[in-house]
Amino acid sequence: MASTKFIPKRALLSNPSRTLSTTSNPPSGLKINSSRLWESIHQTCNQWGAAHRYGPHPEETGMARLTLTDDDAHARRWLADEVHKLGCSLQVDQMGNMFARQAGSLRSSAPMIAMGSHLDTQPRGGRYDGVLGVMAALEVLRTMKESGFRTGFDVGLVNWTNEEGARFPKSMCSSGVWAGAIPIEQAWDLRDIQNPKVTLRSELERHGYLGELACSSDPATGYPLGAHFELHIEQGPILQETGRSIGVVQGAQGYRWLKFTVHGRDAHTGTTPLSARKDPLLAAARMIAASNDIAQAHGALASTGVLQIPSNASTNTVASETTFTLDIRHPEDSVVHAVQDACLSAFGRIAAQDGKGVTFDWTLDTDSPAAKFDEGCIGAVRDAAEGLVGADGWLDITSGAGHDSVYTSKHCPTTMIFVPCRDGVSHHPEEYCRAEDCAIGTQALLEAVVRYDRSMVEKS
Ligand SMILES: [Zn+2]
């Protein structure tokens, strides 16, 4: 970090001519307007969804802009106005995904190079998760427009509907439909968790966001993308702890969610010797502890978020049954599977360990394979980061969370750019990304898109 190659961010942003670059693929020469970016983030948040104040400054609140609420619809209409002012075309698909497009100089009909994220938030969310990615994309388009800069291929912005899955419970919902992973009827029929009479489709209709365009990556019917770049806060502590400004995202880790039910027998705790018991709660506790040891040995994550015993359990009775969840994660699917296998065999041993033993069964509730992002997109971000912050200012990183980019990566070259957020806090009102980090991420987004476009023009 204390290397001479590191360029202080403020110096960099006030003097872009100091940026390092490779001669073959130099910087764009453009400079994003960091105060306009900051204002766009906070003025829209202040008006539409600000909640959970935690400090005296105007931007010291969290957000509650749930998808397809009136606040979300206002923010969408504002975004539509802004992209129209730039001369972009705007199309809305059947899931309300918004695709704004700025024509390139080649007048090519090829799918646009997209910069996407989401404007919706958690009910106790912050001002940066998703919002930064959309506002950064808008700032890149504004910067290009005002400086008369044209990419070769079309570039644009995507606002994905219901990424959070907080109001209509399915996360990455509309990128999932676009990618063909979630049937549209199922997505349309999602119910507002507060009011089951309201469906996602009825809210799309109410706000005029039920578009005619098919929600699909199919060029014949939908809106295919040539590439997808997403700027996002890291939502973890790694960049801050390592003193880096930019995370070059390699992919998203795979995960499997398993549910275990351990069967025993209820028994009197005073009269039943330990040797005569079938105690499922004791076994479950040992299994959860073992899963943690196994995960550590594999460099993976294993977590139990739900542990249930029958509601009529009592202090002086051994429980009859225990269920618990297990969430296993790692960037390599093979490691996720190895952790699962090791857990199953350890659990088998544990089941026979105490008293008269217990039995257990399990189900696989979710299987989300690891996503590997595109080398061409990653290379464009890496070159951009190298030019902006030098070799010690960025690092390769894997996303721990799901994002719309995980779905787009199945159908177009994709990557993400991470910027640090304070203490790694996210999905919390105090989520915070410094203005200079928002700016450097947005500049990296611009440079990466310009570089990627250039490489596509060279290939065409
Ligand atoms: Zn997000």
Image (tube, rainbow, N blue to C red):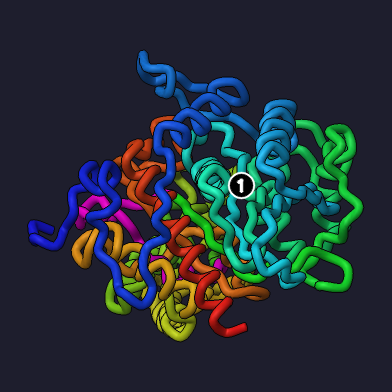
In percent of the image, x 87 and y 73: which residue is there?
220
- Residue 381 image point, x, y percent: 41, 67
Q: Front-most of 205 and 165?
A: 205
In percent of the image, x 41 and y 32: which residue is there?
35
Which residue was labeled with disc 1? 118
Q: Front-most of 216 and 24?
A: 24
Can residue 436 be seen at all in this image of the molecule?
A: yes
Q: Front-most of 239 and 18?
A: 18
Find residue 68 and report its image quarter.
top right
- Residue 181 image point, x, y percent: 73, 69
- Residue 334 image point, x, y percent: 46, 86
- Residue 239 image point, x, y percent: 28, 55
- In the displayed structure, 427 sits above or below 452; it is above
Query: Is 121 positioned to the left or the right of 244 in the image?
Result: right
- The quadrant of the rendering that contains the N terminus is bottom left
Amino acid type shown at disc 1: His
Q: Which residues are magenta?
A: 233-259
User: Callout 1: few (<14), some (14-19), or many (20+) C-alpha neighbours within 10 Å?
Assistant: many
In percent of the image, x 29 and y 45: which residue is there?
13
- The quadrant of the rendering that contains the C terminus is bottom right
Query: Is 203 positioned to the left or the right of 360 in the image?
Result: right
| Residue labelled 1 has its Cβ within 8 Å of some atom of ligand 1 | yes
In percent of the image, x 42 and y 82: which residue is there?
335
